[in-house]
Image (cartoon, rainbow, N blue to C red):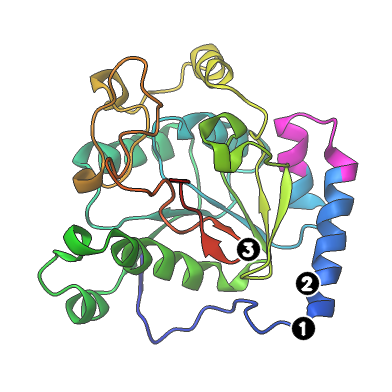
């Protein structure tokens, strides 16, 4: 377990020279050209072994669809660092599922990230920050520990898919995160929900228990609600707010927002 505080500065690229970002942009373009017509497994293997990608970790929420990508990663290399952010506000079912999947897939390097107690007491002493400012709460409990944990990596693997929202509709396998100077890898970018279901069925992977209870997208317990039939799968996240990302994914250096 890693307890991370605000005094540890992430090694981002906010002040990186433009020529460094241009070089990184060129690497991303090379990777996309090289793997554009490949499947998820080949993209994963490329991310983990291609010198253009650098040192890569996986970030997983152990959520509704996480089992598929975690299984693919385990098939390629069980020693890949898997970073799991425990915000201390997760469903108990998510914590149990994380343990179950990690053991089932024999993942050898799962790292649980948490913001340290001192920082939480300073910035959210009553645990009520989420009620007045969900962005600040996500930044404190998710973005801060993740940025610090990723400081030693050149990029990270995500489970994002094009179908999930309009902000993800143009996802490529490899993308530049200019705000941090890292590469993001999206091996399942082209998968639809039916592909995930079929893969999990074929490989007999355990489902997150909350999916059967009406939660197709799962985040922190206070900010996740059930989704009615016909609703967008992510409509239960931060319901009623113009927000569809927790802040760990950025476009042009800013957390993605849903258009009004």
Specify whether residue 39 is painted magenta: yes
The x, y position of residue 40, in whole percent, is 70, 32
Q: Where on the picture, by quarter, is residue 20?
A: bottom right
Q: Is residue 159 visible?
A: no
21 relative to 146 in the view: left or right:
right
165 relative to 24 in the view: left or right:
left
The residue that disc 2 covers is: 21
**Element type at marker 3?**
loop
185 relative to 253 in the view: left or right:
right
Specify whether residue 152 is painted magenta: no
The residue that disc 1 covers is: 17
Q: Where on the picture, by quarter, is residue 198?
A: top right
Q: Within 10 Å of the Cα at label 3, are there few (<14), some (14-19), or many (20+) other Cα atoms?
A: few
Q: Which mark is residue 252?
A: 3
Q: Residue at x 71, y 41 (%)?
A: 44
Is disc 1 in contact with disc 2, using a CB cutoff of under 8 Å? yes
Q: Residue furthest left?
A: 126
Label 3 vs label 1: CA separation? 16 Å
Q: Within 10 Å of the Cα at label 1, are there few (<14), some (14-19), or many (20+) other Cα atoms?
A: few
Q: Nearer the viewer, residue 13 or 95?
A: 13
Label 2 vs label 3: CA separation? 12 Å
Q: Where on the picture, by quarter, is residue 236?
A: top left
Residue 185 versus residue 252 in the image, above or below: above
The x, y position of residue 235, in whole percent, is 35, 33
Q: Residue at x 66, y 84 (%)?
A: 15
Q: Quadrant of the C terminus?
A: top left
Is disc 2 in contact with disc 3, using a CB cutoff of under 8 Å? no
Residue 26 versus residue 220 in the image, above or below: below
Going from N to C along the chain, the mark reached first, 3 or 1, is: 1
Viewer-nearest of discs 3 and 1 = 3
């Amino acid at each position: 377990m890693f307890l991370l505080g605000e005094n540890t500065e992430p090694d981002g690229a906010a002040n990186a020279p433009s020529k460094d970002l241009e070089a990184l942009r060129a690497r991303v373009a090379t990777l996309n050209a090289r793997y554009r017509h490949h499947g998820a497994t080949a993209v994963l293997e490329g991310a983990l072994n291609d010198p253009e990608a650098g040192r890569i970790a996986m970030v997983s929420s152990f959520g509704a669809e996480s089992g598929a990508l975690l299984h693919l990663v385990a098939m390629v290399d069980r020693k890949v660092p898997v970073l799991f952010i425990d915000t201390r506000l997760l469903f108990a079912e998510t914590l149990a599922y994380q343990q179950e999947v990690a053991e089932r897939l024999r993942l050898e390097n799962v790292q649980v990230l948490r913001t340290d107690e001192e920082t939480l007491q300073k910035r959210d002493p009553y645990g009520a920050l989420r009620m007045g400012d969900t962005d600040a709460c996500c930044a404190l409990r998710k973005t801060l520990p993740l940025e610090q944990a990723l400081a030693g990596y050149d990029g990270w693997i995500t489970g994002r898919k094009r179908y999930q929202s309009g902000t993800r509709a143009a996802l490529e396998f490899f993308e530049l995160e200019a705000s941090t100077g890292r590469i993001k890898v999206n091996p399942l970018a082209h998968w639809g929900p039916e592909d995930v279901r079929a893969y999990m069925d074929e490989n007999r992977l355990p489902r997150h228990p909350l999916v059967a209870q009406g939660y197709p997208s799962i985040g922190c317990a206070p900010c996740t609600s059930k989704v009615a039939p016909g609703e967008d799968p992510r409509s239960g996240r931060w319901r009623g707010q113009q927000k569809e990302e927790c802040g760990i994914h950025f476009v042009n250096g800013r957390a993605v927002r849903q258009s009004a």
